[in-house]
Image: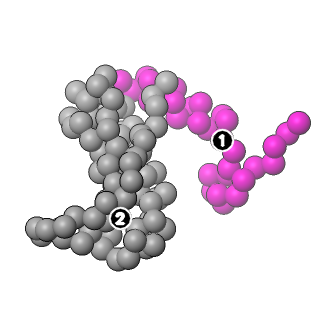
Amino acid sequence: MIHSLQFGEILQVKSGRKARRWYCKAKISVEFRDAYKDSQATAWLGSGSLSDAQALLSKAKEKEQRKFLDKIAKHDPFLVAAERLYDALFSNSDDITGKKLPVSQ
């Protein structure tokens, strides 16, 4: 199965036109680099405070993971379809409401 991206710590750009913006990066596995067309994925977290960036982190990670899967799907659509089916079957939260589903014994 395709693994999820593992993002590192939150960093801040120090200079240039993107100065004071927060971001974090995840390395792309070697087997997916040709399909992804890059060796890293970057999640941009805005230019507010560090606490604002931390609040945006989960949504930014989800967005980058979706983007990663979409790029991989063009290269190997069957693998991504299987991954999404697995996630849908064994999800622990409702996709519409976002609430956690009850755990059956």
Check residue 91 in the rendering and tell me which mark sits there, or answer none.
1
Query: What crowding class fits label 1: few (fewer than 14 Cα within 10 Å), some (14-19), or many (20 or more)?
Result: few
Q: Nearer the viewer, mark 2 or mark 1?
A: 2
At label 1, which amino acid type do we have?
Answer: Ser
Image height check: is 54 above or below 9?
below
Query: Label 1's element?
Result: loop
Image height check: is 87 above or below 75?
below
Image height check: is 23 above or below 88?
below
Task: Tell which of 96 and 87 is nearer to you.
Answer: 87
Give the magenta part as a residue range: 76-105
Name the residue located 61 percent from the left edge and 38 percent from the top edge.
88
Q: Is residue 22 visible?
A: yes
Name the residue located 57 percent from the left edge and 32 percent from the top edge.
85
Task: Tell which of 73 and 12 is nearer to you.
Answer: 12
Q: Position of residue 83 (x, y in %)?
A: 51, 30
Report, in whole angstroms, how far the alpha carbon at label 2 lies from the one at label 1: 26 Å
Q: Which residue is mark 2?
A: 45
Query: Label 2's element?
Result: loop
Residue 86 on the magenta segment: yes
The first of marks 2 and 1 along the sequence is 2
Q: Position of residue 76 (x, y in %)?
A: 35, 24
Task: Tell which of 56 and 86 is nearer to you.
Answer: 56
